[in-house]
Image: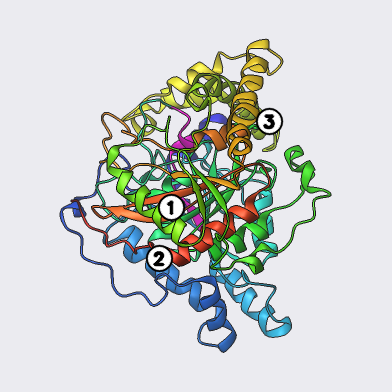
Amino acid sequence: MDRRDFLQTALSAGAVSGFTRRPSAVPSPGLAGPAAPPQFELEEATLEELQAGLASGRWTARSLAEQYLGRIEAVDRRGPELHSVIELNPDGLELADRSDAERKAKGPRGPLHGIPVLVKDNLDSGDRMQTTAGSLALAGAPAPRDATVVERLRQAGAVLLGKTNLSEWANYRSSNSTSGWSGRGGLTRNPYLLDRNACGSSSGSGAAAAASLAAVTIGTETDGSIVCPASICGLVGIKPTVGLVSRAGIIPISATQDTAGPMCRTVADAAVVLLAIQGFDARDPATAPMRNRATSDWTRELTPDALRGARLGVARKSFGLPSSVEPVLSEAIAALKQLGAVIVDPADIPNAEKLGDPEIVILDYEFKAGLAAYFATRGPDYPIKGLAELIRFNSENREQEMPWFGQEIFERAAKRGPLSEPVYRRARQTCRRLSRGLGIDAVMARHRLDALVAITTGPSWPTDLVNGDRYTGGSSSPAAVAGYPHVTVPAGTLHELPIGLSFFGRAWSEARLIRYAFAFERGTKQRRRPRFLPSL
């Protein structure tokens, strides 16, 4: 395929995506008052409930896949038109049939056997689907093999139903971007209030999981891109320790901070998924600590009394959160106390406000280097080699790719040098020191804490394609920059808008954080299904 043919294929990619791509820049006319979606048998269904139905014969993997496909048609393509699913797997029903045959012959592989899943469109899949990070520049050329996460989902018996929309290039193209918008997939809507933002960059995964378009979804995070959309979409999101889950085959931003993780409606479901996708992978050096690390099945350790005696510090400062979330935090703290936790309030993270500038330096350098390395995996004839080709493509196809915002982050990162430059090394050392030893580790040691808690992010904001995002603050950066784990769980609502509570702590403390989140979830039951309201 020559350059001209490649670009033509990219711009007509909707024809091979399983549906025709709508004009991505214009909100659909149904926003004024879309009809409520029809009743859906599997709405809010958990993995345990789905497996019970599969075991009893109430459902088959194929019937589950068909029902979720019907839900996608009713909610994502019609009705509210969430635009959260960027592509359907043309082999999805065949995979479901194979799952049913295997179950009949050998029994289930485990809790994900026959379960439909959606993964973000920056995870490679070695099939007939594409992997584009939402960009038309990558459309028309499927990846040669699965990302390790996708591979492990298949090994667990999951049925890969399709891919979710995202903030294009995982929201690392422009500082004036609108989260949830991509040139290929259009604008993802928030299923709670359709004129509000679903947050990014895993906006499609968040909206799809919240609207029960699949049993579970996979997102990725560099800084906030799992926990923000999870919080805003009323979900449980787990950003694991960097190195717990392989990044091989995932379009990168940062080797220091990137990770994939589950986005689900319950803590138990998210724990099952994380257990399936974790582990050592020779393709990702960051997973080296997992080679000899013994991991127990923490899904068996989820108990409602896990918070009894836990020392939790409340982090409040440096997050830019609005005062409107204070009642939610106060109620969450009261619930934690009632559930037996010992609360240290405040327990603010030192130096959190100093992470921004050096983090940007790290991301710029690693983005440039990481993209070049990723594109090399697509083969020597792949027309995109790095940022230079992407910048040129966007400029030549401005109407489709840059109708609302530009690519100044691309242009800035393209000017960075190799990872051997002192400015990069200093920034990385600074971030590691401030976020770990002089940050999270310091406050936890000082107060003898088992974990930190904070409001995940403020309420969702009205989507504004002209002016870009209006973030309402968030607590993701300290754990993201440190590479430490972060779990968010629904904690309440503000005027129909979900607000999440975060649990985060030292590296490799996922099991503890998940137990705490599970106990909080069971003790408060704050998850609310979306109502697809047009606006407040």
In this rendered view, identify the residue nearer to me: 20 or 529.
Answer: 529
N-term-proximal mark, 1 vs 2: 1
User: Between marks 1 and 3, how big is the CA–CA gap?
Assistant: 28 Å
Q: Amino acid at mark 1?
A: Gly
Q: Nearer the viewer, mark 2 or mark 3?
A: 2
In this rendering, would 181 be left or right of 351? left
User: Between marks 1 and 2, how big is the CA–CA gap?
Assistant: 19 Å
Residue 116: percent from the left, percent from the top? 53, 67
In this rendering, would 87 be left or right of 152? left
Pointers 1 and 3 in contact (CB under 8 A)? Answer: no
Q: Nearer the viewer, mark 1 or mark 3?
A: 1
N-term-proximal mark, 2 vs 3: 3
In this rendered view, identify the residue nearer to me: 355 or 199.
Answer: 355
User: Between marks 2 and 3, how big is the CA–CA gap?
Assistant: 44 Å
Mark 3 — residue? 373
Give me the disc on residue 345: none
Residue 463: percent from the left, percent from the top? 27, 40
In what element is the residue under mark 1? helix
Looking at the rendering, the stretch of residues picked out in magenta corresponds to 162-173
In what element is the residue under mark 2? loop
Q: Amino acid at mark 2?
A: Lys
Mark 2 — residue? 525
Sort mark 3 into few (<14), some (14-19) or many (20+) by Cα contacts within 10 Å. Answer: some
Residue for point 70% across, 81% down:
107
Mark 1 — residue? 206
Q: Amino acid at mark 3?
A: Ala
Within the image, what quadrant is residue 376 found in? top right
Within the image, what quadrant is residue 36 found in? bottom left
Q: Residue furthest right?
A: 292
